[in-house]
Image (spheres, coloured by chain):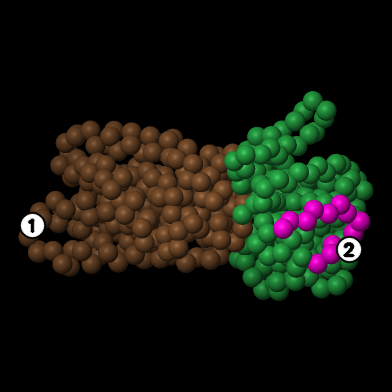
């Protein structure tokens, strides 16, 4: 109940403030349409790189709004208030991760078919892109939240955030690209399973790491 | 920074006002009582019943009514939505309407909170304490920026809270204007 209230509030804030969600979606759409323009028009080349590029773009777009995940609440005193509520820090972290997924990753998922079209992928490739983004974004939100909690009290923490988070997301990029490739080639390569496993593990474990990060920054 | 050798107890129905110059550690002391700040050597405990003593900070933190230095108000949400979220999140069912009305904010309830003045924001932050029935209130400068009528109103609420068996620990600069025990930080 408390978690739902918090997720609902964040969705409402995102829909009113609008800035971060729109920024992430616009960033994603711009990059995935610009990349093909810069790649040599050789048959098959775009197909080969499409998976990796889409995964990287979605991770970068999601990172744009991550730096605000706890920062806004921290700066206006809301985080202290949230902590005095009934949720444990771990549940609070899980709720914020879910809220980030709904406000940033879900819109990215909704426009991910655009990326497939921009990359001139056939129908199977489009399915692969949507599937890869759907499976990868929970991990991006979860791992990203760890970075956001660590950089909470750092001024301009948004700059250091990608440095912390992106290396940890290497498996997401690798397996996500694998998912797209397997759909394109019609051959099963296990990437769906690996990506799902990584996402599941990230979502289950990261609330504990996020809670530790919040605890450190709140008691500073 | 917290000074050494602080020792106090507050019982049900009492107000403790914490005084001291800027930087004396009033806010830190409040945060320590709430469990937001770790106290490396020392003990802070809530006694609910003679044999029910809570010293663990993570448990203490869920029991306090907190009015921090910052207001914790979301400017995108209206006054009512701010309070309604607080109610839903804390699973408390105090009347949002009554709380807003008693602090003179009833006419503004549908206004986005970003248009409030400093004093009005402070009142809205105080209204959160009224909808959530916590018996220990920790208030950091509850009167700052509030006009004289608002101050009287806030005092009245603190007084009533303590008459009903609550406790208020208040960090203040100016005298609180209520009968209270006083703790002076150096």
Q: Can residue A80 be spotted in the picture? A: yes
In this picture, is B45 found above or below B154?
above
> Which chain is in brown here?
A
Q: Position of residue B153 (x, y in %)?
A: 87, 64
Instruction: Mark 2: give few (<14), some (14-19) or many (20+) Cα within 10 Å.
Output: few
| Chain under callout 1 | A
In this picture, is A155 found above or below A125?
below
Q: Give how far apart the Cα atoms at labels 1 and 2 are.
A: 81 Å
Q: Which is closer to the viewer, label 1 or label 2?
A: 2
Q: Position of residue A219 (x, y in %)?
A: 56, 48
Q: Position of residue A212 (x, y in %)?
A: 49, 41
Question: Taken as a whole, is the magenta stretch helix, strand or loop?
Answer: loop
Q: Which residues are magenta?
A: B174-186
Total labels drawn: 2
Instruction: Mark 1: give few (<14), some (14-19) or many (20+) Cα within 10 Å.
Output: few
B178 is within the stretch colored magenta? yes
> Regarding mark 1 in the picture, which secondary structure is present there?
loop
Visual hue assigned to chain B:
green
Residue B60 or residue B7, whichever sits in front: B7
A157 is within the stretch colored magenta? no
> Regarding mark 2 in the picture, which secondary structure is present there?
loop
**Residue, x 77% and y 28% (percent of image)?**
B52
Q: Which mark is residue A43?
A: 1
Can you identify the residue that label 2 sits on? B177
């Amino acid at each position: 109940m408390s978690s739902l209230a918090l997720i609902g509030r964040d969705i409402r804030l995102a829909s009113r403030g609008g800035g971060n969600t729109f920024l992430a979606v616009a960033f994603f759409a711009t990059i995935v349409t610009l990349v093909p323009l810069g790649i040599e028009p050789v048959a098959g080349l775009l197909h080969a790189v499409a998976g990796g590029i889409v995964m990287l773009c979605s991770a970068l777009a999601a990172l744009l709004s991550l730096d605000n995940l706890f920062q806004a609440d921290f700066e206006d005193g809301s985080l202290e208030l949230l902590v005095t509520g009934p949720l444990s820090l771990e549940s609070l972290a899980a709720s914020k991760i879910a809220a980030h997924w709904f406000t940033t990753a879900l819109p990215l998922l909704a426009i991910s078919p655009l990326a497939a079209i921009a990359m001139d992928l056939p129908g199977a490739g489009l399915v692969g892109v949507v599937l890869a983004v759907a499976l990868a974004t929970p991990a991006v939100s979860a791992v990203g939240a760890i970075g956001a909690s660590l950089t909470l009290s750092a001024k301009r923490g948004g700059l250091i955030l990608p440095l912390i988070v992106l290396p940890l997301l290497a498996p997401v990029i690798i397996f996500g690209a694998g998912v797209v490739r397997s759909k394109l080639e019609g051959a099963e390569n296990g990437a769906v399973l690996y990506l799902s496993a990584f996402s599941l593990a990230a979502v289950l474990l990261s609330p504990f790491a996020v809670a530790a990060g919040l605890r450190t920054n709140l008691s500073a | 920074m917290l000074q050494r050798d602080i020792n106090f107890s507050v019982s049900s129905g009492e107000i403790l006002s914490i005084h001291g110059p800027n930087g004396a550690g009033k806010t830190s002391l409040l945060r320590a009582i709430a469990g937001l700040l770790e106290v490396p050597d020392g003990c802070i405990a809530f006694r609910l019943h003679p044999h029910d003593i809570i010293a663990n900070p993570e448990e203490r933190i869920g029991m306090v009514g907190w009015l921090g230095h910052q207001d914790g108000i979301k400017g995108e949400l209206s006054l009512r939505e701010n309070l309604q979220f607080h109610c839903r999140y804390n699973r408390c069912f105090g009347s949002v309407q009554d709380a807003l009305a008693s602090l003179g904010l009833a006419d503004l309830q549908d206004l986005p909170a970003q248009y409030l003045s400093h004093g009005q924001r402070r009142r809205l932050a105080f209204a959160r304490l009224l909808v959530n029935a916590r018996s220990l209130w920790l208030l950091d400068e509850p009167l700052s920026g509030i006009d004289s009528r608002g101050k009287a109103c806030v005092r009245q609420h603190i007084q009533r809270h303590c008459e009903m068996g609550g406790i208020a620990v208040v960090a203040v600069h100016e005298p609180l204007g209520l009968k209270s025990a006083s703790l002076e930080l150096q």
